[in-house]
Image (tube, helix red, strand yellow):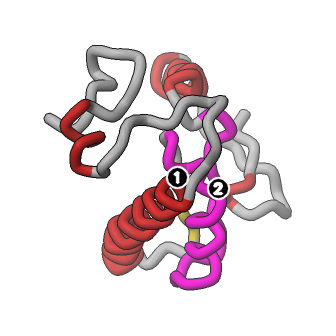
Amino acid sequence: MDYFTYSYKNKMPSKKLCLLLDGSVRKPEEEITQRHKDIAAALQLVYEDALFKIINYVHKETKSKNLVIAGGCALNSVANGKILRNSSFKNIWSQPDPGDGGTSIGAALFVWNALFKQKKRICSGQPLLRSQIF
């Protein structure tokens, strides 16, 4: 965690990470250099490697053809496309607001199902992961 400051500042990389990557954080008005592109490409590869280890394990354990993902990483369209092309999952669903703002979706479902004791109903003719829960 020495490389990140997002838990107490409004930015992610620490001075230690900037030193490791041989430069400061790019300002919005600055040009995108090859260094920036190389860092982004390397991070994408590391992320995808970790992601595929996790989802391959999940598929091995569940044998499900459906995958639901959430969190900020669920918006990584490059990786999501690779999940569909290079994994055993046939359906993937990413929560429309996968960050903290989407917590309200889970809270509403909890109240509906757990507190109001309502059953989940799935619209017929639609895949499970693209269904609407009433």
The type of residue carrying mark 1 is: Ile
Q: Earlier in the sequence, mark 1 or mark 2?
A: 1
Q: Quadrant of the N terminus?
A: top left
Relative side of 84 to 3, left or right: right
Q: Say whether residue 11 is left or right of residue 68.
A: left
Q: Which range of residues does the magenta coloring cover?
A: 72-97
Quadrant that contains the C terminus: top right
Element assignment for label 1: strand
Q: Dot 1, how many residues are within 10 Å of its Cα: few (below 14), some (14-19), or many (20+)? A: some
Quick check: 124 above or below 54?
A: above
Q: CA distance from mark 1 to mark 2?
A: 6 Å
Exactly how many numbered labels are in the figure?
2
Q: Residue 24: within the magenta?
A: no
Residue with the mark numbered 2 = 93
Identify which amino acid the numbered label 2 is placed on: Trp
86 vs 46, nearest the viewer: 46
Q: Circle 1 sits on which residue?
A: 69
